[in-house]
Image (spheres, rainbow, N blue to C red):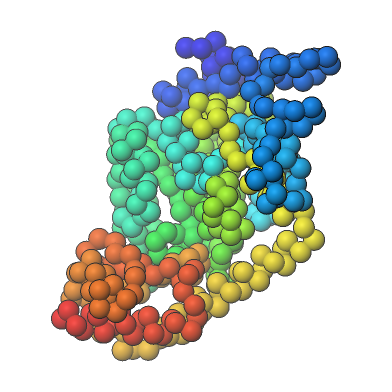
Amino acid sequence: MNPIAQELNNTIKQAAPHVYEMLSDMGKNLFFPEGILTQSAEAKLKAHRINATIGIARQGSCVLSLPSVTKYITEIEPDNYLSYASSFGLLELREKWLKELYVKNPSLGGTAVSLPVVTSGITHGVSILSDMWVNANDVIVMPDMMWGNYNMIFCVRNSARFVTYKSYDDALTHFNIDDFERVIREQAAHNDKIITILNFPHNPTGYTLSREEATRVAQILIDVAQKGTNVVAACDDAYFGLFFEEETSKESLFAKLAGKASRLLAVKLDGPTKEDYVMGFRTGFTTYGVAADANLDRVYRVLEKKTAGCIRGNISNCSHLSQTILVKSMEDANYKILKQEKFDLLKSRATAIKEVLKDPKYAEGFDVYPFNSGYFVCIRVKGVNAESLRRHLLDNYGTGLISIGEDNLRVAFSCLEEKDVKTLFDIILSGINDLR
């Protein structure tokens, strides 16, 4: 093992031994290299005459650039987007995002968490989570309805095992906490470590837990950890903030889990992708919340270094341009007003769907999964195969939806104009009747 990795591991072992136990084999071996990066940093401070350390093309005092590129970006200097960003991400952006975490999650106040590390989108953050915390055959407790890419990231890449719970009750009225608890406790009884992904607002159903449900989910995981099982609880908050109903919990489960038990590691995976509507920027964040006997700040620095090392050994660093634009956007005087306008637009679409689906005629063709947030609503079709229906709607009605399993269709109202809501569900009902 590299001596730097060993030194990092020793810090975690001393202050948070259970966190060290939860690291995957790769996670234990990860470190942030000193070599070229350290020598370049030293040269930046001391090489006042000639600095020939960094693999960045320069001319005079500026980064070398092509006018055919820079002419499109007129308000940012080339040095602020064409040079490499740190593998940790821009410090200014990380600090701004951390500050916003406490604003968005008031109950997190008083709990120390790590400084977010910038990832290339939330999917990249999920992949880093898998590399750092998942070994082959590790158990990951998942809902039976989940984002399909989780399988590629956890099972195909890292050979994890999914154990699923039923997402909703049979009547599709509420999240099935009882089955969540049953599976969590069963797996905790048979494994030293369990992992679970908490994805709210949920993809594909667009559901977020109520305040009461969120409290109970957190209590279950804390209790399991306090009784001796190591728990990695990853909050995939890709659609965070898009909460459309009063009773919906407006905070991340991360706020209820961070720092609550020595055997509980809380990981927050989020970013501006959906929160700030910059899907193509590919910028996300990974933030940790742990309990340590001492030296909590040092534990966080170690986890940040291991995360940055994982990035360094994979994609090197994330887009400098995206990060710079995001810093400027967050500093804009109208930032929160502009975000509220987009939120109101999406909420209006969700409300329109709720109103349209009150018509009892639709119950003849499908049931609706609970939804109150995010981008999606799911329906469970009756008497027909979901994939056959999807193809029928595409071929005969020019209407595209996503089929999930044999019974479910996902509607992305994020890209559905409000005026088309009733038309869409009438088409779905017609397609079901056609196939019957």
Name the image quarter holding residue 303: top right
Numbered marks: total: 0
Q: Position of residue 172 (x, y in %)?
A: 34, 70
Q: From where the camera sits, is residue 121 visible? A: yes
Q: From where the camera sits, is residue 256 visible? A: no
290 left or right, relative to 175: right
The furthest residue to the right: 48
Q: Nearer the viewer, residue 216 or 115?
A: 115
**Is 146 located above or below residue 39 in the figure?**
below
Q: Position of residue 120 (x, y in %)?
A: 54, 42
Residue drawn at x 34%, y 69% is 401
Q: Position of residue 227 (x, y in %)?
A: 44, 37
Residue drawn at x 68%, y 37% is 65
**Is 282 located above or below residue 249 in the figure?**
above
**Is 362 located above or below residue 141 in the figure?**
below
Residue drawn at x 50%, y 80% is 418
Image quarter of the C terminus: bottom left
**Is 282 located above or below residue 5 in the figure?**
below
205 left or right, relative to 325: left
23 left or right, relative to 53: left
Q: Nearer the viewer, residue 85 or 389?
A: 85
40 left or right, relative to 409: right
Name the image quarter holding residue 323: top right
Q: Position of residue 288 (x, y in %)?
A: 58, 38
Q: Nearer the viewer, residue 101 or 285?
A: 285
Residue drawn at x 65%, y 32% is 84
